[in-house]
Image (spheres, rainbow, N blue to C red):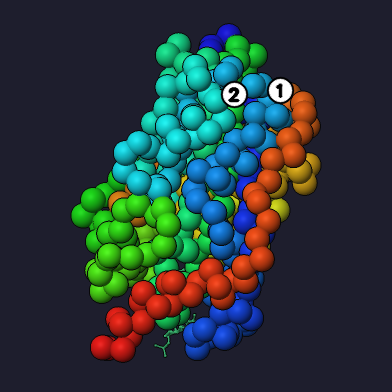
């Protein structure tokens, strides 16, 4: 049987400090009802630590679930649009942190599509024999770039990390197909100029280093982009939408997910949604949702799973996989983030101060 890459471990890291809609009501002119109706989001994680800290927790859970040690990994990929610094990569930071001494390591930036680009990279590296065991992590500190005076963007995004271990399998399970695409012309609809999220915002220009986001344009591109990509990936796998047991979409907006599902004629009971608790965590959203899906018993041996995403660039992609036998972790890890006494308002204070001049002058 063909050599494929199958997921044998999974894990996530959700920051303990939450930004609820009620908290946002204290910062901007908005309401819990408006946000829930337009996005499905009720809360988002706001990290008090760095990207590598969240990546480490998710990675340790995924490794434990797979019954592996860090030294068993031979390729480590971190998908992130919010890396700590440019070089060394987040992947090299994580390699050092967990002691994945035998792993090659690189970062990948395809914004919210980072996880599906990472899945395609992991699976093709395993299929070609370049790698045997890949640790893929999506990790984001998105609150860093959010302007918490701008109600059109700051309600959407949150922080977090998710991870999976991919191993070679010749049992018929694993990634069956990938579809990737990009359109640089449409890229101007979502621009995020800041690079490097370590520490607090400083020595930057708040007029420039803020997310530019054309919400409605992105909404339409996302729905069409994910629909087309899912159809192409399924065709490549020789499967139809009727064969699909679970779709795990990028968690951008409940309405985007519902619109894409409607166009694909997939019932919502076959779609994994956990956006209410986490918001849009970019490259981390699919592995966080996948980890929740396994915990909820929504994945079973042989299940056909479609992952699909759309994001900045603009980029899109989907993967189709047949889930393997593992639906319970081989072991568990007690890895967790250090506790904090800081409130969500403490954590957002630097952003509010940094971006205030943009709003004073407008
Ligand atoms: O990973 C891919 C990334 N993409 C995404 O995350 C999704 C992109 N787009 C969206 O999610 C949606 O377009 C938004 C949630 C950003 C906005 O929803 P919408 O239904 O497209 O609203 P809208 O922009 O058409 O705004 C409708 C009204 C406006 O008021 P007026 O002009 O009609 O008086 C906005 O000013 O709602 C107002 N509004 C708000 N009201 C309360 C915008 N943001 C808010 C808010 N609270 N937070």
Is label 2 in a helix, a strand or a loop?
helix
Q: Is residue 180 left or right of residue 15?
A: left
Numbered disc in front, either 1 or 2: 2
* Neighbourhood count class around disc 2 (C-alpha, 10 Å): few under 14, some 14–19, many 20 upward: many
Q: Is residue 1 left or right of residue 220?
A: right
**Most distant residue in the top direction:** 1
| Residue 245 quadrant | top right
Q: Toward the viewer: 40 or 201?
A: 201
**Quadrant into which the C terminus falls:** bottom left
| Residue 306 quadrant | top right
Tell me if residue 210 comes above or below residue 184 in the rendering: below
* Residue at 64 percent of width and 34 percent of height: 60
Q: Is residue 37 left or right of residue 350?
A: right
* Residue at 55 percent of width and 45 percent of height: 53
The answer to whether residue 245 of the structure is visible from this angle is no
**Quadrant into which the N terminus falls:** top right
* Residue at 68 percent of width and 25 percent of height: 66
What x and y, as percent, mark residue 181? 33, 42
Tell me if residue 238 comes above or below residue 159 in the rendering: above
Mark 1 vs mark 2, CA separation in Å: 10 Å
Q: Toward the viewer: 311 or 232?
A: 311
What x and y, as percent, mark residue 233? 46, 36
What x and y, as percent, mark residue 146? 42, 68
The answer to whether residue 357 of the structure is visible from this angle is yes
Q: Which label belongs to residue 67?
A: 1
* Quadrant of the image where one finds ligand 1: bottom left
Q: Which label belongs to residue 18?
A: none
Q: Are marks 1 and 2 in contact (CB under 8 Å)?
A: no
* Residue at 56 percent of width and 79 percent of height: 24
The residue that disc 2 covers is: 70
| Residue 124 quadrant | top left
What x and y, as percent, mark residue 125? 43, 20
């Amino acid at each position: 049987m063909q050599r494929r890459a199958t997921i044998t471990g999974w894990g996530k890291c959700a920051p303990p400090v939450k930004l609820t809609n009620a908290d946002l009501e204290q910062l901007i002119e908005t309401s819990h009802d408006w946000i829930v109706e337009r996005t499905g989001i009720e809360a988002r994680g706001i990290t008090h630590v760095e990207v590598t800290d969240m990546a480490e927790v998710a990675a340790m859970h995924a490794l434990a679930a797979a019954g592996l040690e860090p030294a068993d990994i031979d390729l480590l990929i971190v998908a992130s649009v919010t890396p700590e610094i440019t070089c060394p990569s987040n992947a090299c930071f994580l390699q050092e942190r967990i002691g994945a001494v035998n792993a090659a390591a690189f970062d990948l930036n395809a914004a919210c599509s980072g996880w599906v680009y990472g899945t395609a990279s992991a699976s093709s590296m395993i299929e070609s024999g370049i790698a045997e065991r890949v640790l893929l992590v999506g990790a984001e500190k998105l609150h860093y770039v959010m302007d918490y005076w701008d109600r059109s963007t700051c309600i959407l995004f949150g922080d977090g990390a998710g991870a999976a271990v991919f191993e070679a399998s010749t049992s018929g399970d694993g990634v069956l197909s990938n579809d990737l695409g990009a359109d640089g012309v449409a890229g101007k609809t979502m621009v995020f100029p800041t690079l490097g999220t370590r520490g607090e915002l400083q020595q930057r220009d708040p007029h420039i280093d803020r997310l530019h986001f054309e919400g409605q344009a992105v909404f339409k591109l996302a729905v069409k982009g994910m629909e087309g990509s899912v159809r192409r990936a399924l065709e490549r796998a020789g499967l139809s939408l009727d064969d699909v047991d679970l779709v795990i979409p990028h968690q951008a907006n409940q309405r985007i997910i519902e619109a894409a599902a409607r166009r694909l004629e997939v019932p919502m009971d076959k779609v994994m949604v956990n956006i209410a608790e986490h918001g849009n965590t970019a490259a981390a959203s699919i592995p966080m949702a996948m980890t929740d899906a396994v915990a909820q018993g929504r994945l079973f041996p042989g299940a056909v799973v479609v992952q699909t995403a759309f994001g900045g660039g603009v980029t899109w992609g989907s993967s189709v996989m047949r889930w393997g036998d593992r639906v319970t972790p081989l072991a568990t890890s007690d890895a967790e983030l250090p506790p904090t006494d800081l409130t969500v308002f403490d954590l957002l204070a630097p952003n509010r101060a940094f971006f205030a001049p943009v709003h004073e002058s407008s």
